[in-house]
Image: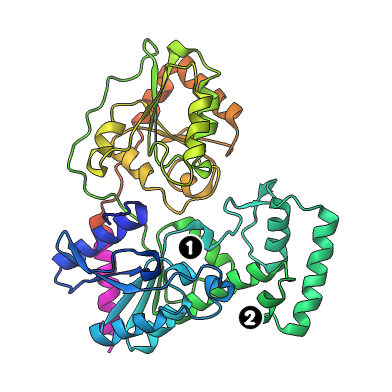
């Protein structure tokens, strides 16, 4: 922040601010890239010092991009550790050579600091990104190289017979190179299971190296337990709602005599599933429903997807696109709608927007993905539908329009989310445990 403002950035910023208020000496470290002409200067934001070090972009170097070989900027990170001499180094995401890698975690550990890792991304567990085995059925959650490779090859639309033959060849080849000789496998570029094995190795390495591993979602913790990765140093600290500066302003209870007001708020990228929602709305009576879309409008790599979603809505004046809003206004804006839709097609860790909707006392209708079902129980405090299925979503929405009292009863069951203050308190206890042991 302030250049990037997303869920992870807000989480780190609010955690750092809370720890600062508890008396910790907190500094945020952000890698920068001299070869990308990014401003390298340190700065301060909201009372928090932000330190930048040259991480060096390593595009074109496969060994560094995968994290198999240390990034050139690792030496700068080690110098930073030597200068700052931190008691605790808390990592919030690894991005290999384009940011922070396993080598950075090891360097922090070797410096004598206690090391904490908080996992924010669902891809930490599922490389495919949807926990759907071969895109057909719910995955059983067991992560193995052969199984995950078969799943990823199917996603690339490879013939089943060819994929099976490749996996057999992969198993034979790795018997000679060694399953953890990743450098040899990457250089040969003939190992379809390489990415799956490296993925598993990364999970195991992080858990083993860190003094504490934190999962922000219960479903993620359960999957780690299933694969025997949830060790004594692992814990679950579910995320909470950041403090909002504006209060909800709820509209009148939906009675079926006016349009059902639905809101979508978030990035407009394929995995968020807005297209699924728009398709469903275009099959409904225009006078019966309104859809308000809040999100970035056409900037960056996914501008073409924004254009696609807009094209689906052509001719439907009951579908309105708005620009992004300040984070402090989110709860207030959501509260002026009857229903929040989260139609994601890929798994997320713990969508903050669900808690913002709960704070606004607005029911959520979302995909039947683990991160959503952890917060939303179908027919109790919200609704779920099969991910990517616009017909199933349409059926749910039609049901609400035909039975307005159903939405009113669901709305009464929406609970207020946990405050982020509890998250800060839990980290405080975790940090203190490192030093109370001795």
Say which residue appears at 33% left-offset and 89% top-offset. 112
Horizontal and vertical percent position of residue 427? 28, 68
Query: Can the viewer see residue 258?
Result: yes
Horizontal and vertical percent position of residue 15? 26, 62
Near-viewer residue (103 or 435): 103
Residue 386 on the magenta segment: no
Q: In the rendering, which numbered label is found on residue 183?
A: 2
Query: Can the viewer see residue 343?
Result: no
Say which residue appears at 82% left-offset and 71% top-offset. 169
- Region of the chain picked out in magenta, as a range: 423-438
Image vertical order of residue 29 relative to residue 286, above or below: below
Find out whether the residues at labels 2 and 1 contact each other: C-beta distance under 8 Å.
no
How would you classify the magenta stretch by its main secondary structure? helix
Residue receiving disc 1: 221
Left or right of 5, for residue 300: right
Tell me if mark 1 has few (under 14), some (14-19) or many (20+) residues whose alpha carbon lies within 10 angstroms of its own.
Answer: some
Its colouring scheme is rainbow
Mark 2 and mark 1: span between their CA atoms?
30 Å
Q: Quadrant of residue 253?
A: top left
Say which residue appears at 47% left-offset and 17% top-offset. 316
Horizontal and vertical percent position of residue 93? 42, 66
Judging from the image, what secondary structure is the residue with disc 1 in? Answer: helix
- Quarter of the image where the C terminus is located: bottom left
């Amino acid at each position: 922040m302030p250049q990037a403002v997303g869920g992870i950035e807000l989480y780190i910023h609010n955690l750092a601010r809370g720890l600062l208020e508890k008396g910790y000496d907190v500094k945020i470290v952000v890698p920068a890239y001299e070869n990308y002409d990014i401003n390298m200067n340190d700065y301060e934001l909201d009372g928090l010092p932000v330190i930048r070090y040259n991480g060096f972009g390593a595009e074109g170097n496969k060994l560094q991009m995968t994290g198999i070989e240390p990034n050139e900027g690792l030496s700068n990170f080690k110098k930073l550790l030597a200068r700052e001499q931190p008691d605790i180094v808390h990592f919030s995401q690894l991005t290999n050579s384009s940011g922070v890698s396993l080598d950075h975690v090891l360097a922090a550990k070797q410096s004598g600091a206690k090391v904490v890792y908080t996992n924010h991304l669902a891809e930490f567990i599922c490389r495919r990104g949807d926990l759907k085995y071969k895109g057909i059925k719910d995955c059983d959650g067991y992560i193995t190289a052969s199984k995950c490779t078969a799943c990823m090859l199917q996603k690339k639309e490879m013939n089943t017979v060819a994929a099976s033959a490749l996996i057999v060849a992969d198993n034979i080849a790795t018997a000679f190179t060694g399953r953890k000789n990743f450098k040899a496998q990457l250089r040969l570029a003939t190992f379809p299971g390489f990415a799956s094995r490296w993925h598993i190795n990364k999970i195991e390495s992080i858990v083993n190296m860190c003094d504490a591993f934190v999962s922000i979602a219960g479903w993620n913790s359960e999957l780690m337990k299933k694969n025997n990765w949830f060790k004594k140093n692992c814990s679950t600290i579910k995320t909470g709602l950041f403090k909002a500066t504006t209060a909800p302003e709820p509209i009148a209870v939906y009675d079926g005599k006016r349009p059902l007001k639905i809101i979508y708020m978030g990035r407009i990228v394929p995995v968020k599933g807005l297209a699924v929602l728009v398709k469903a709305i275009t099959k409904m009576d225009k006078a019966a429903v309104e859809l308000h879309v809040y999100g970035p409008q056409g900037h960056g790599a996914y501008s073409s997807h924004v254009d696609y979603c807009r094209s689906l809505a052509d001719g439907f004046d009951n579908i309105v696109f708005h620009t992004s809003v300040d984070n402090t206004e989110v709860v207030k804006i959501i509260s002026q709608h009857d229903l929040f839709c989260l139609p994601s097609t890929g798994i997320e860790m713990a969508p903050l927007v669900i808690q913002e909707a709960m704070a606004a006392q607005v029911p959520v209708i979302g995909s039947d993905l683990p991160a959503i079902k952890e917060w939303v129980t179908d027919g109790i405090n919200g609704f779920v539908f099969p991910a990517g299925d616009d017909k199933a979503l349409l059926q749910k929405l039609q049901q609400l329009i035909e039975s307005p009292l159903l939405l009113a009863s669901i709305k009464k069951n929406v609970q207020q989310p946990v405050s982020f203050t509890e998250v800060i308190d839990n980290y405080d206890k975790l940090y203190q445990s490192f030093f109370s042991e001795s």
